[in-house]
Image (cartoon, rainbow, N blue to C red):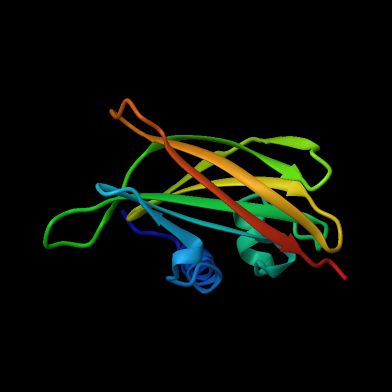
């Protein structure tokens, strides 16, 4: 089966944006022993137009996107992406809670969980996320904050 060139280019562009937007720092990942959860929040205007279109994401300075990746550590090998039940909410400084609706994006060697939400200039949101890897009883809990600048 051949992969259409435009689809492959879109995939490469999405992966490049996600890698660029998720530097390997303790701030954007949490280690749970057997699993690692990578996370990042950004405004959707940072996505290339082709990538946003391919994945049905509306590009806007006032729209945020949260990306979650759950990896299982494998001894002597690269960590493997795993399916998970991902849920969460974003909470403003005033205590207003917004439930997040995640959708799964599967690629040949990756699984992403993406949620979109509205943001305002200089707004700081606290994200409270749970990711339960398939077949596991306990959920992995990640909490982090991000300030958005839309102007």
Position in image of residue 102 (x %, y %):
58, 38
* 151 vs 110, nearest the viewer: 151
Q: Which residue is drawn at 58% across and 53% down?
A: 144
Task: Describe residue 87's horizontal placement relative to residue 138 as left or right.
Answer: right
- Location of residue 61 (image quadrant): bottom right
Identity of the residue furthest to the left in this view: 76
Question: Dividing the image into 4 quarters, which one contains the C terminus?
Answer: bottom right
Q: In this view, does 148 lie above or below 95?
A: below
Horizontal and vertical percent for residue 112?
A: 47, 49
Horizontal side, residue 32 vs residue 57: left or right: left
Q: Where is residue 51 in the image (x, y as percent from the top left)?
A: 61, 63
Residue plotted at (86% across, 56% down): 120
Foreground: 99 or 97? 97
- Name the side, left or right, on which 29 lies relative to 134: right
Question: Residue 77 vs residue 17: left or right?
Answer: left
Tally the marks.
0
Give x and y (percent) for residue 83. 37, 39
Q: Which residue is situated farthest in the top direction here?
A: 137
Residue at image location 52% in from the left, 74% down from the top: 20
Residue lying farthest to the front in this orientation = 94
């Amino acid at each position: 089966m051949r992969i259409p060139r435009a689809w492959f280019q879109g995939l490469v562009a999405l992966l490049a944006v996600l890698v660029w937007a998720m530097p390997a720092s303790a701030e954007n990942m949490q280690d749970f022993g057997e699993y690692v959860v990578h996370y990042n929040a950004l405004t959707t205007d940072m996505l290339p137009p082709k990538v946003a279109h391919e994945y049905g994401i509306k590009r806007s300075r006032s729209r945020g996107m949260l990306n979650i990746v759950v990896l299982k550590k494998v001894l002597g090998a690269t960590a493997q992406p795993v399916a998970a039940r991902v849920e969460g909410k974003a909470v403003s400084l005033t205590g207003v809670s917004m439930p997040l609706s995640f959708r799964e994006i599967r690629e040949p060697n990756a699984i992403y969980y993406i949620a979109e939400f509205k943001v305002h200039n200089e707004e700081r949101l606290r994200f409270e996320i749970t990711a339960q890897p398939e077949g596991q009883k306990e959920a992995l809990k990640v909490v982090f904050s991000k300030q958005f600048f839309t102007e």
